Image (cartoon, rainbow, N blue to C red):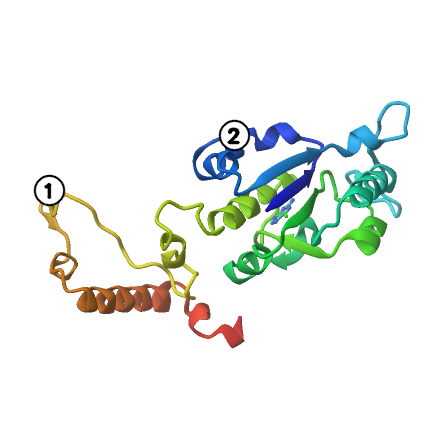
Amino acid sequence: MIIEIATLFPEMFKGPFTESIIKRAVESQYVEFKFHNPRDFSTDKHKKVDDYPFGGEAGMVMTPQPLADMINHLTSKEAFDAIIFMTPDGARLDQRMVNSFSHFNRILILNGHYKGIDQRIRDKYVTHEVSIGDYVISGGELATAVFCDALVRIIPGVLGDSSSALTDSFQDGLLAPPVYTRPASFRGMSVPEVLRSGNFGEIDQWKLEKALEKTKIRRPDLLNPSKK
Ligand code: 6GU
C-alpha cells in the first residue's frame, strides 16, 4: 500500500512513523509513505497557503491554489484509489471503515490546518472525508497518524502473529476480553483458572463471555448496530 500525505507539517509524522509497528511495516515494504507539502506549490511570492475566510469568521482557511496544483501534479503521475480529507466534520472512523480502506493500493490524505481548506477543493477532488471522533484537534496530522496506524496494522503480515489483528477490540464487533501473562499469581491476585486449563474450547467460550459482558456494560451500542 502506498500512502501519500499532503501536509504543511511533515515533521509531525516523525515520531509515530519511525517507531514500532509502522516502522517495521515500512522497513519490510508492506507500506510506503510519501510526503508532499502544499507550500511547495504556492505561486504566492511569500509561499502563502492561507487567507481570511469570506463571511468573516475567526481563523484562517487554506487557499485553493496550492492544494489544487499539488493534487493535479500528483494525479497526473499516479491514479489514487481515494483522496481523503481528514476533518472533524467527516464520517466518524470505525474499524469497519478502516477495513474497507485497507483494500486500496494507493491513497492520498489531505491534512487541513487553521479553519480547514477551501470548500471548492473538497467539492472537486476529495472522495472521502474522515474524522477520528467527536472532538476537535488542532490539525489533521495527528488524526492522519491514527488513521495510518489503524490501516497499516491490519495489512496481512504486518503483525508478527498473523491472527492478532483479528482478536482486537472491534474487529469482531466486540470489545476485547481481559488478558493475563505470567506470573499466574501476582501479589495475591491470580489468573482465572480456565485460562490455564489447556481446554481451548472452554477458553474460547470464556473469552466470548467476558467480551460480551464488557461490551454490554461499556458499549451497548455495539450490540445494537442499527441504533448507532
Ligand atoms: Cl480529522 N481533524 C481535526 N482537526 N480534528 C479532529 C479530526 C480531524 N477528527 C476528530 N477531530
- Kind of residue sitting beneath label 1: Arg
Residue designated by label 1: 187
Residue 57 numbered mark, or none: none
Residue designated by label 2: 15
Question: Is 182 situated left or right of 151 in this image?
Answer: left
Contact check, label 1 and label 2, Cβ < 8 Å: no
For label 2, the SS is helix
Picture quadrant of residue 56: top right
Q: Position of residue 81 (x, y in %)?
A: 69, 54
Q: Earlier in the sequence, mark 1 or mark 2?
A: 2
Question: Is 22 situated left or right of 53 in this image?
Answer: left
Q: Position of residue 194 (x, y in %)?
A: 14, 62
Badge 2 density bin: few <14, some 14–19, many ≥20, Cα 10 Å:
few
Q: Residue at x 80, y 52 (%)?
A: 125
- Of 138 and 45, the residue lying toward us: 45
Q: Residue at x 59, y 39 (%)?
A: 32
Question: Is 130 situated left or right of 209 in this image?
Answer: right
Marks 1 and 2: which is nearer the front?
2
Q: Residue at x 53, y 59 (%)?
A: 99
In the orientation shown, which residue stands out farthest toward the top? 46
Picture quadrant of residue 140: top right
Up/down of 168 relative to 137, above or below: below
Q: Position of residue 181 (x, y in %)?
A: 20, 46
Badge 1 density bin: few <14, some 14–19, many ≥20, Cα 10 Å:
few
